[in-house]
Image (cartoon, rainbow, N blue to C red):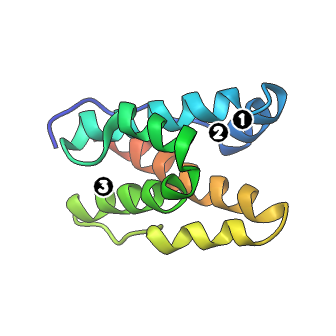
Amino acid sequence: MTGSTGKVRNPWGVIGLSIITLGIYALYWQYATFKEMKEYSGEGIGGGLGLLFAILLGVVNIFMMPAEVGNLYAASGQPKPVRGPTGFWVLIPIVGGIIWVIKTQGALSRFWGKEEQA
């Protein structure tokens, strides 16, 4: 891994800002998250494609984002705390999306935090 670490974000902050901005922050968050992961690892779909999927086919990112977060862990020799199937949490009405953000962003923030300490 040669790129810089991404931004540590509070999952509740992501949820709150997404609600307050009627989803606009959610689009930015997906763009920024995919961009940071690509810059760090050199792998993944990157910000532009992540934003395009978010706008046109949001369901793709629900599975792609936790898969990429898990791949960051795997590439550093750690067990994957989230994987593509983590996206199935969104099938639970109302709370499923919240659980998905907490699991996915939480795992990514922990990863960035560990990398900054290293």
Do labels 2 and 1 touch, CB within 8 Å? yes
x and y percentages locating residue 14 in the rendered image: 68, 37
Residue 61 position (above or below residue 42): below
Callout 2 crowding tier (Cα within 10 Å): few <14, some 14–19, many ≥20: some
Do labels 3 and 2 touch, CB within 8 Å? no
The image's mark for residue 93 is: none
For label 2, the SS is: loop
For residue 9, side relative to residue 93 (left or right): left
Give the amino acid type for the residue marked by disc 2 in the picture. Answer: Asn
Residue linked to disc 2 = 10
For label 1, the SS is: helix
Do labels 1 and 3 touch, CB within 8 Å? no
For residue 16, side relative to residue 57 (left or right): right
x and y percentages locating residue 71 in the rendered image: 30, 61
x and y percentages locating residue 110 in the rendered image: 48, 49
Considering depth in this image, is 91 or 108 the residue closer to the camera? Answer: 91
Q: Residue at image x 26%, y 29%?
A: 4
Q: Residue at image x 80%, y 30%?
A: 22
Is residue 80 visible in the rendered image? The answer is yes
For residue 101, side relative to residue 115 (left or right): right
Callout 1 crowding tier (Cα within 10 Å): few <14, some 14–19, many ≥20: few
Quadrant location, the N terminus: top left
Callout 3 crowding tier (Cα within 10 Å): few <14, some 14–19, many ≥20: many
User: Mark 1 or mark 3, which has the lower sequence index?
Assistant: 1
Q: Residue at image x 38%, y 46%?
A: 114
Per the model, the C-alpha gap separating discs 1 and 3 is 22 Å
Residue linked to disc 1 = 13
